Image (tube, helix red, strand yellow):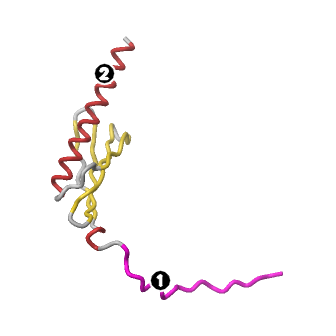
Amino acid sequence: MTVLVPPLRPRPALARRPSIVSPAAAITATFEPEDHPGGWRIHYRLARTREMFCGAAEIHCHGQPHCELPIFEPQANALASIDLLREQCLAWIAARGQDTAGAGHLSA
């Protein structure tokens, strides 16, 4: 027995539904990556939600991804957000360097 299925048609009710995300929340920005000693590179991505900026930074070393850190406290402007993310990333990199140095010290 063969059952015929009618062709799919767009639903006009869904097409007219207003967007749930406001235009201000849809603003996202990526910034030029920053290079740091030891082959580390940080990529920043921000999103504006209402009057605040939130986002994340991806940390790479020699082209390999290592970590993605979200911003812990949304900031009032993009520069403050980048500064906060940079501090978090540099602290993570410094801790990683200490862990690596400590591990090498223990194995010797």
Q: Quadrant of the N terminus?
A: bottom right
Q: Quadrant of the C terminus?
A: top left
Q: Residue at x 24, y 51 (%)?
A: 73
Q: Is residue 9 above or below residue 76?
A: below
| Disc sitting over residue 101 in the figure | 2
Q: Label 1 belongs to which residue? A: 14
Q: CA distance from mark 1 to mark 2?
A: 57 Å
Dot 1 and dot 2 residues touching (CB under 8 Å): no
The x and y percentages for residue 2 are: 80, 82
Q: Does 108 sit left or right of 30 as displayed?
A: right
Tag 1's secondary structure? helix
Q: Is residue 9 above or below residue 97?
A: below
The x and y percentages for residue 6 are: 66, 86
Tag 2's secondary structure? helix
Q: Residue at x 48, y 88 (%)?
A: 12
The x and y percentages for residue 84 are: 20, 47
On whether residue 3 falls in the magenta region, the answer is yes
Q: Nearer the viewer, residue 21 or 7?
A: 21
The x and y percentages for residue 44 are: 27, 51
Q: Within 10 angstroms of label 2, few (less than 14), some, or many (20 or more) residues?
A: few
Q: Nearer the viewer, mark 1 or mark 2?
A: 1
